[in-house]
Image (cartoon, grey):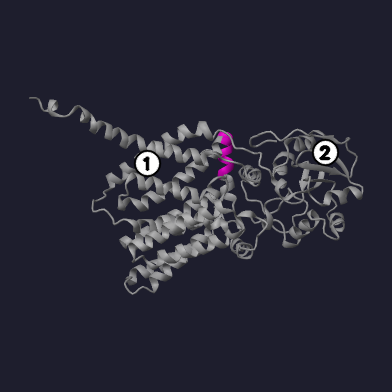
Amino acid sequence: MHVAHAVPPSLRGAPAVSTLAHAVLPVVSAFVLLSFLAVTPADADLWGHLTFGRDIVRTGSVQTTDTYSFTSDQPWVNHEWLAEVTMWSAYRLAGAPGLVILKLVLACLVALALLVSWRPHAFPAMWRDGLLFAVAMSAWPQLQFVRPQLFSLVLFAWLLVVLERVRTSGRLRWLFGVPPMFAAWVNFHGGWIVGAVALLIFTLCALFDRTTSFRTKAGLAATTAAALVATLCNPYGTGMLAFLADTVRPDRGDIVEWRPLSDMGAFVIALWLVPAALAAFAVWRKRTVPLSSLLIALVFAVGGVRVVRLVGFFAIAVAVLLVPCLREPAAAGDDLTRRRTWLARFVTVCILAGACALPLFGRRIRADAPWMPEPEAATFIATHGLRGRMLTWFDYGEYAIWHLSPAIRVSMDGRRETVYSDRMRALHVRIYANAPGAMDEVARLNPDHAWLPRICPVIATLESHGWRRVFQGPRSVVLSRTDTPQLVRVNTPVAPRWFPGP
């Protein structure tokens, strides 16, 4: 009897089916994850990031003097200039899909860092994919937009991977890339500070650990010092460090993601609880977790409670430092050829999944959030030739810069501390709220026009002082004190629209 005839019909072809499933399932999982991340809304700063990145590319230099606002009262420290150049380059090459592709590439780089840290432990596919989804959900508030913070998530994840490799292997050559990483990071985003915190904690734990060799201690100390010196590699030198030391603080309650966890709803609290539960389970399972891993995770757990923006960093810290504690390392070797094959497979899966997800969910960036004005307002300002100084609502500033500059100069926008002093920001808050003396503040600014949300309390006071309503939509109002056309009313609901608008 032929051997093949002895195999039950139900099992014939089983190895082939298993091989096919092994090849297809990662693509399916990646497709679901990338489809979730490809849905991209615009945040209030996206128009500004592209404008400023475009200016840097065109002029070949980083501007230190602002020309878009008539109230900017301090030198412009653009701590995100390299991210803005990258974002503008992606937009120039492929429009809005180019920005979504950039975001998905950065998300894949974070995923690659996590998988590299988990690979020695050979997690089953279901565990691996479930953990990736858990981290993606916890970091979703940071991953949903295209913005410079994405670069900090990537660099933070890879910094932790490097530190873990040094701890587990003792090979100091991994540290050679840390100073260049910080030299780039300081130009991408101010989030390099979270990386510096993690690096300092790791180094201090090693210095006080009696089991760590003197060579490793010296290497870590030298690397930490070199990394901090590398942050001077920016267009502002020590001015960048002084700016961040003065502005990065948790008392920025006017920005949602800088508020404490207790101010958020149940959904956001649940996002923090996911990595917290994973961390607790890993500590309970392993019992002997490295002190540096515990402290780094704890610092970002507390930081995430105090500032919601840090929840994504907390999730990544848990994923890289504590999740590996859930499973002992596999005994199999891992030579260079096998690593290259694994990396090639990862890249292939990401490309295939992204090529399927992007046309379905990432072709456009939605730009009709409730905080945005109706498109007819910007069209009215442009077509009726309004020019000069405009008192602007905070969220409208960079949108107005993109669509209306140079005819219109704004009074306030999302750059905040980078061009506006505390006094100037407080002045705008008093005007918006119609606080006592608000009209005196308006007189000091001396704007020609105002563009504000319909519910802004100061509108009625402006009108009582001679300002005329020239545009009224379902969300915003344009007022002017110059000769302008008669009032235009738009009462239709705001329809879905897409970046860049109007």
Residue 481 found in image quarter: top right
Q: Position of residue 357 (x, y in %)?
A: 48, 34
Residue 346, numbered circle: 1
Q: Say what secondary structure mark 1 lies in.
A: helix
Residue type at mark 2 is Phe
Magenta stretch, residue numbers:
86-96
Q: Main secondary structure of the magenta part?
A: helix
Residue that mark 2 sits on: 471
Spatial separation of the CA atoms under disc 1 and disc 2: 53 Å
Q: Position of residue 179 (x, y in %)?
A: 46, 59
Q: Is residue 397 visible?
A: yes
Q: Nearer the viewer, mark 1 or mark 2?
A: 2
Mark 1 and mark 2 residues within 8 Å of each other at the beta carbon: no
Left or right of 44 on screen, residue 465: right
Q: Residues within 10 Å of mark 1 (few under 14, many from 20)?
A: some
Q: Position of residue 450 (x, y in %)?
A: 81, 46
Which of 303/228 is in front? 303
Residue type at mark 1 is Phe
> Was residue 209 drawn as part of the magenta stretch in this picture?
no
Q: Say what secondary structure mark 2 lies in.
A: strand
Left or right of 409 on screen, residue 470: right
* Residue at screen point 13% across, 25% down: 5
Q: Position of residue 447 (x, y in %)?
A: 84, 49
* Residue at screen point 49% across, 62% down: 301
Q: Residues within 10 Å of mark 2 (few under 14, many from 20)?
A: many
Q: Which corner quadrant holds the C terminus?
A: top right
Q: Is residue 231 visible?
A: no
> Looking at the image, is 292 positioned above or below residue 278?
below
> Was residue 92 drawn as part of the magenta stretch in this picture?
yes
